[in-house]
Image (cartoon, coloured by chain):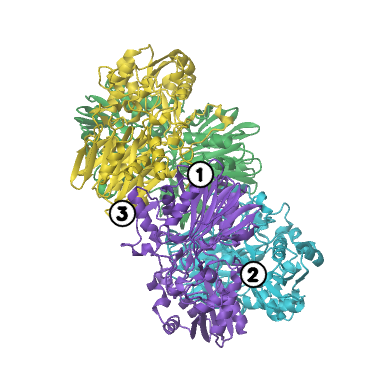
Chain colours: A cyan, B green, C yellow, D purple
Amino acid sequence: MVDNDARDFAPDDADGSPFARDDHFHDECGVFGVYGHPEAAALTALGLHALQHRGQEAAGIVTYDGQQFHIERHIGLVGDNFAKPAVMARLKGNRAIGHTRYATTGGQVLRNVQPMFAEFHGGGFAVAHNGNLTNALTLQRQLQLRGSIFQSTSDTETVIHLAATSSKGPLVDRFIDALRQVEGAYAFVALSDKKLIGVRDPLGVRPLVLGDVDGCFVLASETCALDIIGGTVIREIEPGEMVVITDEGLESIRPFAEASSRFCIFEYVYFARPDSIFGGTSVYTVRKRIGQELAREAPVDADVVIPVPDSGNPAAMGFAEAAGLPFDLGIIRNHYVGRTFIQPTDAIRHMGVKLKHNPNRSVIEGKRVILVDDSIVRGTTSQKIVQMVRDAGALEVHMRIASPPTVDPCFYGVDTPEKAKLIAARMSLDELAAYINVDSLAFLSIDGLYRAVGNASRNRNAPQFCDACFTGEYPTRLTDRALAGGGRSLNLLVESQ
Amino acid sequence: MVDNDARDFAPDDADGSPFARDDHFHDECGVFGVYGHPEAAALTALGLHALQHRGQEAAGIVTYDGQQFHIERHIGLVGDNFAKPAVMARLKGNRAIGHTRYATTGGQVLRNVQPMFAEFHGGGFAVAHNGNLTNALTLQRQLQLRGSIFQSTSDTETVIHLAATSSKGPLVDRFIDALRQVEGAYAFVALSDKKLIGVRDPLGVRPLVLGDVDGCFVLASETCALDIIGGTVIREIEPGEMVVITDEGLESIRPFAEASSRFCIFEYVYFARPDSIFGGTSVYTVRKRIGQELAREAPVDADVVIPVPDSGNPAAMGFAEAAGLPFDLGIIRNHYVGRTFIQPTDAIRHMGVKLKHNPNRSVIEGKRVILVDDSIVRGTTSQKIVQMVRDAGALEVHMRIASPPTVDPCFYGVDTPEKAKLIAARMSLDELAAYINVDSLAFLSIDGLYRAVGNASRNRNAPQFCDACFTGEYPTRLTDRALAGGGRSLNLLVESQ
Amino acid sequence: MVDNDARDFAPDDADGSPFARDDHFHDECGVFGVYGHPEAAALTALGLHALQHRGQEAAGIVTYDGQQFHIERHIGLVGDNFAKPAVMARLKGNRAIGHTRYATTGGQVLRNVQPMFAEFHGGGFAVAHNGNLTNALTLQRQLQLRGSIFQSTSDTETVIHLAATSSKGPLVDRFIDALRQVEGAYAFVALSDKKLIGVRDPLGVRPLVLGDVDGCFVLASETCALDIIGGTVIREIEPGEMVVITDEGLESIRPFAEASSRFCIFEYVYFARPDSIFGGTSVYTVRKRIGQELAREAPVDADVVIPVPDSGNPAAMGFAEAAGLPFDLGIIRNHYVGRTFIQPTDAIRHMGVKLKHNPNRSVIEGKRVILVDDSIVRGTTSQKIVQMVRDAGALEVHMRIASPPTVDPCFYGVDTPEKAKLIAARMSLDELAAYINVDSLAFLSIDGLYRAVGNASRNRNAPQFCDACFTGEYPTRLTDRALAGGGRSLNLLVESQ
Amino acid sequence: MVDNDARDFAPDDADGSPFARDDHFHDECGVFGVYGHPEAAALTALGLHALQHRGQEAAGIVTYDGQQFHIERHIGLVGDNFAKPAVMARLKGNRAIGHTRYATTGGQVLRNVQPMFAEFHGGGFAVAHNGNLTNALTLQRQLQLRGSIFQSTSDTETVIHLAATSSKGPLVDRFIDALRQVEGAYAFVALSDKKLIGVRDPLGVRPLVLGDVDGCFVLASETCALDIIGGTVIREIEPGEMVVITDEGLESIRPFAEASSRFCIFEYVYFARPDSIFGGTSVYTVRKRIGQELAREAPVDADVVIPVPDSGNPAAMGFAEAAGLPFDLGIIRNHYVGRTFIQPTDAIRHMGVKLKHNPNRSVIEGKRVILVDDSIVRGTTSQKIVQMVRDAGALEVHMRIASPPTVDPCFYGVDTPEKAKLIAARMSLDELAAYINVDSLAFLSIDGLYRAVGNASRNRNAPQFCDACFTGEYPTRLTDRALAGGGRSLNLLVESQ
């Protein structure tokens, strides 16, 4: 889910911290759910820890103990907050859902942290969400006119209000009634006093997998969240499928009209963990294949292939392999990053402080270097890294990017700058090469990317994936986009807690 | 306001802390509002500090700066939280409302702290409340059926939802529409982007005064909140009156059917600060008169009159004066009390730890002592204090209580034990005297109390005050009381923040 | 004890908080010790709570469990820090000493909080101290030359280093050796692995009493610390006496040359709690007698006697009694004060914010008022209170002060401004009356004060008390005062913890 | 430096956190100093951030502003504590030293965090230390007999007391006098009001480099701390060399008898960052050479070489290169680790929770795998990783270790288990291979290691490095080891702060 008021956040220079935005698109959430396990909260915490790359700023868990729901939501890493025995002891019960979250506005606002919880006439209802609804604001305004009171800027709350005011009876019917009114991309997990529910939008843009641990059903954004707890993958939840898990087992429902799958292709490029598996193929394998495609599409005479760590590693290995060139770790990454890292004063900024990356001069000096990175968003980090590699003695620097140019923002639960800040939307290839100061620059073609994920090519009439960030072809309506005045909808600016 | 789930809280032994419940009824909230002053938040913090005796566990302030609302709500004393420059700096704007609060359930839950804020279709709306609605749960259930989602157990939120779902147009009309549906006692302050609103229930059970500071209108529960900021009293808001303060000035509205005033008589006995003024008479003066009435009704031959400090002081002085006996400070009170004070272990509890009171032996030894206290609720504190005075060498101990026996709980925003725990409802006067181990015991008569507040006597057909805790005659319906299953209405047990 | 670097702290305006310095001299520490009781830490916490008026900014407790010492030192009230079960659980053992502390410099520095602990060759040694050494800096410089390393600015540490570097063998001998080198006033409690030690300086300037609880020896600054735990007073430790408490019982040692007692007479005026007893007479009784003396020395025709609460209460009662005038509570004090209270902005300061005191108009209006206060230090508070009483409608205001003019600073563990800031040292009586704007002003005479404490008069050749703050006659040498450069001796300005 | 009371800390299972000890030897500290730069504190914070791998549990910085020293010491990562503007603003001055620290005992005790500071007669003196003194306890006992009082268990404090009690005059002479009495390994940085001092022990066991940033001298444990601030390396401080940096420049002193260098060879194996340079060669290059040596010494027929990330990466790459086998990332590491990570309950421990590592099945399945790790300490992690790789479908698992067997503990500032817990000291190669369940196991030979660092072979009569952990040949005396009763020397168990 995306905060409506977070859309504009786009620092120009955010080096060094997982919390500062680096120069990437970022998936905004991971979700997890488990039903019937005595260690439900602990498994959820572990699952969220494995999904931490999908959202590092806050996390929450809701459990149900047969009598009461329990909720814990905290700003910060899963491991910092959900390792505390006191926190875990409060999360009683054998079913749980959890959420880890990327973006918030300047002041991190706890009321926007998920899962969200509401008291319905028939009982409690907790919901967590990965994705974004493209008509949430429009619906919110209609609901407010009707008397619904919003506590947050989250589109998750819109769905909760839609369910609360539904004319249907049972909770599942209300939830379906709500989902039929929304547009956009989503993977929800929800918990009532009787049920654990998982659902993907009709196009299946965001991922959600079904697994098993100790004979209990588990839902998670990626398979790596099953691996960490020793679980096994059963299958992916299908696009447009809702699964309802109760004491009686799992029921699969198809509440929506049939549609062709449009899974997010950027999950392969950058969002997902390399050890996760989608459609039977590991993300790591796809990334190596991407590197191979790239080497074939844009070869260059050079001495060494160096990844921008860590996300560029597999593509760089694939590139080196296909190009028959040595692969080497020419840039060392410092993984010790604090919560809010040292902001260099102006006085020392000019020194070229290298909080996150340091060149490994012995690998670079006197060499013609091919740098492989996964994507370029604003270009600022690329510029710095190229300069750093040149300062370390590279004779030539050739940049190869393991995806097509990102020229359009994402509206499906990914933190992206507006189009005007996407450097590839503003510059030609030559301009961009000059801007980041490389001897040559190449992006993977869109068809190359489709080949790497296993298709012969992109079907232009009915693309097999959502690739809107590369093509501008959005697979759903973008209703809110037309709203006058844009996203802000709350009058309460800051709620400090 | 009262949390619906806080009604049963009744520790048997709570000595020593303003946070532990001592053996008193406690008024549960103080409210404050100011319109048009550049120091709105600071004045509100000061006003709440002066009203701290009405609620010590949490406080909140909402301001509006012409563009945005700002809210700060914190567990703890006003002076601990609203002295911080960073907190105050966030409370921008020249209009504000504030709330200080007594009771919460075991885990102090921030979401129940006031003011409450909601986004309405037409803008933000913040509300704070002193009192309690006796049909809040009934209304809440109706609202939930309609699709309203509750975030708290507060009856304040019920009123907000009633306003949100009202079919009326303008905010004031919606608020009136909501208030016409509620029963009980209340003094609300509310803030929209254009208006500061104050309103008392039709019987005027809870107090609300209108004042002026630097030419700006101020609303406050008691006059002492005007004194602290150098303000002046204009008048009391009348029972059933709503005042709407805007840039254009103050408008007085009478939304309800006319009714006779039933101001809470216990405000005079204990709740209000002695330096506050109601109906032109200071509470201190009434309390001295109460002591005088008591001396006339229940004289006894003795050597010294000693108050149970500090609430018994004025009545003891009045008693001594009328009885022609010396007044002396025979019990010393320790005002240094921590947030959650030292819980004596069982091993040292028997030693008779005296956290809060210590006898002043030089005043007591060898004397026949008259102890004056304001009321007896459970009797446990009285028992200890009598024993302490005997241990300090008193020859006789005569207890005089500056109010009639409290035999019924209050449902109008006061924290009282259920009837079965009110010792005066369970014991005869003689039994109670024996229980607390005094040589004689007397309570003020109900007519004596009415005389002290300036009436010839209580009008039995139409009592001039709400005195339900002494008489069981409740001036409003108690609709929720009939609800099966009682108060609890939320499925979410703990939300830690 | 006094921080050498805290001597100059003297805010001109410190209204409203126990932490802000109000316009009083302040005793700077309370000490407590207990030996052999299974609840040693809890009793110490309770004792320190009863001594909280002697120091409100920090507190510490050291226990010994037969194997190890345990220490907890915290900024803040005893009840805020030592009520936490986790803190108390760490303080294992059946013997303990504790300390509560008034003054620190701007940044409250934990390393100066007592008790102090040192590893000696023969074992651990913890020391806490009430008083001040007047040659501590001189000794510190000698010790530093010898290689001793100081961690704090506390004179307590000077004594510890003197003991550590003593040529004597056993710990008690080393401690005595150290004490024989120091000048000033002190009451120490100390704890080794075998002994609880208490000692008063040869003149007995600062108090220390010996008590019993459950058959165990207790040491405390005042008797009220015995009352709170249900203990009994055995006797006062005598001036120049050291008591050494072990499993074998109590041994009394006289390490110093005989000297006449010079107990601090200001303990009666203001420092001690009214329910504490020194020399068989309660402080409350002395204060009432002071009021009586004052009424005899400086009568005035008036309608009502009003105390400046709470410290002026007993003297005002004594005054009213002797003068045959009514006593009334004309000023109400707000006891809810936060840690660091609301600093009024300049914009609202002029409004005459009344954080701490509010006049009770009904008692004052149209009356000729006698105000009784215990002392005047800088005069700023008196000025404000007189104005407040006039604004409330007093016809005349006569100020009576329950002590002689304070014209000299204290160097014996009391926080006093330098002489130039003592208003009575700078102004004649008439000037002062004009400054604080009263119709008449009178101080108690020094002989009147001596009469109130039970002497016929002050013995000018050999005063029975230390009264240096009234007379400038210091009973010990003031060696450090002559040091060039004054007090500061540490190069480390801030240690944040 | 090493806490004397930390020597025994050796959890058997510490997976998943940089704070939990994983199965490695750990260097215990990094030091940094800068003289004359306006951004001294910020540069020091950045330098410590780059040295974070040398100590992750606490960090401290001392600055001097020409008048006063300022100190900040905090538990936690540099980036968490020294990013706060308030902290940095307190660290005024243009010279600074800093320290980052690995080990503490169970309760992390702030008083042991460095730099340590002492008030000397002539001024303040701050010291930070990487290494360990092998006669610190012996010296401490002598100093205590003389009257020195210790505040910590740190051997750094021993050196400070030696300097304080030295009979020499100037500070540098006192410091040299102190160092001449100590045995062991050390790299000190020290700051007085006039000087920044750096010194390495006569054998140069621990590293210290001299650099330049903006024309100012910098001292740091590794060159990567110069890189981060855009500095340049001047040279390494030589074994036994002291440099004294003042406004006049740098003076080099040789206070000790000449000795042959015995630099710690384990710095190359694991401690240092790969991008750091010692003796002109990057650590990364040495590690790749180690992998090449290992491939030559212990070849095996297999399909893929997989590192245990991240420390095994370069050696694995070198191995793959030399063996002509593919290198692949078969194990994915989760870098999001919390402060105190989730402790799996017993109930879920058996599930094989994989907090830190997850196999990349696509790379492993059906393959004969060579796993390359840098060392084996207790063997527990190796056991788990091998099992994990087998579960992911490996046909064979061959383990190759990039160092000789670690059979002896280090006493020079490295956190190592006692000998009995070093698995290679207890088992033969075959036993160990069986224990960790591999098809084959080989360690690098000691001569192979010497070859990788550039020597023809180890000189058995005068080894070129300290390799005591592999050989048991300690280059200094181990005086404290003979002390009866072992390390503990403080009676104060817990000081909570």
The amino acid beneath tag 3 is Gln
The amino acid beneath tag 1 is Val
Contact (Cβ within 8 Å) of mark 1 with mark 2: no
Indicate left or right for B309 with D20 as reference. left
Residue labelled with disc 1: B182
For disc 1, the chain is B
Q: CA distance from mark 1 to mark 2?
A: 60 Å
Asked which quadrant contains residue A406, the reply is bottom right
Q: Residues within 10 Å of mark 1 (few under 14, many from 20)?
A: many
Contact (Cβ within 8 Å) of mark 2 with mark 3: no
Asked which quadrant contains residue B2, the reply is top left
User: On the same chain: label 1 and label 3?
Assistant: no
Q: Residues within 10 Å of mark 3 (few under 14, many from 20)?
A: some
B330 up-or-down from C143: above or below: above
Q: How many marks?
A: 3
D14 up-or-down from B391: above or below: below
Residue C10 at what x, y percent from top left?
Answer: 47, 30
Q: Residue lying farthest front?
A: D257
Q: Under tag 2, what secondary structure?
A: loop
User: Given this view, does label 1 or label 2 mark the residue nearer the observer?
Assistant: 2
The amino acid beneath tag 2 is Ser
**What residue is shown at x 75% (from left), y 60% (from top)?**
A419
Q: Under tag 1, what secondary structure?
A: loop
Residue labelled with disc 3: C68
Q: Residue lying farthest bottom?
A: D301
Residue labelled with disc 2: A311
Q: Residues within 10 Å of mark 2 (few under 14, many from 20)?
A: some
Q: CA distance from mark 2 to mark 3?
A: 52 Å
**What residue is shown at x 64% (from left), y 68% (from top)?**
A360
User: Given this view, does label 1 or label 3 mark the residue nearer the observer?
Assistant: 3
Q: Under tag 3, what secondary structure?
A: loop
